[in-house]
Image (cartoon, rainbow, N blue to C red):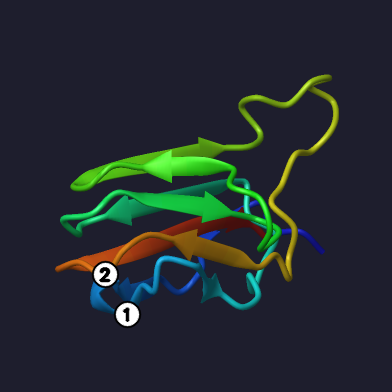
Amino acid sequence: MAKNTVNAIEMYSLDSATLTGGYDEFVTSLDKACFMLRITNASNKQISISYDGTHLHDTVTAGSTATLMFQTNNVPRSHIALMPKGQKIWLVGNAGTGYIYLAGYYVE
């Protein structure tokens, strides 16, 4: 039975010094279907984000945060918009200093 409570997934992190300039796997598989993801780029280099490992889908400048609210942008409102459980996420960027973080939230 649904509890209708918001829960957080365990935060992912990656040392930007390990970025190769190619598609580097960041999240191998989201543990839950999330209605919100927040990517914080606490490094000194801009990064790009890919959800398929082939195409670039978003960018996060150095020292900034991108918040993706899937349900807020859902049409029609009677449907549920979530980043699927099992979703992989890749980062593209050059090696830098500092970490990149991903936080996510889901309803149980």
The residue lying furthest to the front in this view is: 21
Quarter the C terminus occupies:
bottom right
- Can residue 12 be seen in the rendering of this structure? yes
- Can residue 6 be seen in the rendering of this structure? no
**Upstream in sequence: badge 2 or badge 1:** 1
**What residue is drawn where x is 65% and y is 24%?**
73
Q: Nearer the viewer, residue 67 or 46?
A: 46
Mark 2, residue position:
95
Q: Secondary structure at mark 1?
A: helix
Whether tag 2 and tag 1 are in contact, CB under 8 A, the answer is yes
**What residue is drawn where x is 26% and y is 69%?**
95
- Alpha-carbon neighbours of circle 1 within 10 Å: few (<14), some, or many (≥20)? some
Quarter the N terminus occupies:
bottom right
Residue 93 location in percent, x, y?
37, 59
Query: Where is 20 relative to 8, above or below?
Result: below
- Alpha-carbon neighbours of circle 2 within 10 Å: few (<14), some, or many (≥20)? some
Type of amino acid under label 1: Thr
Q: Secondary structure at mark 2?
A: loop
**What residue is drawn where x is 70% and y is 65%?**
87
Residue 38 location in percent, x, y?
42, 49
Residue 59 picture quarter: top left
Residue 77 picture quarter: top right
Mark 1, residue position:
18
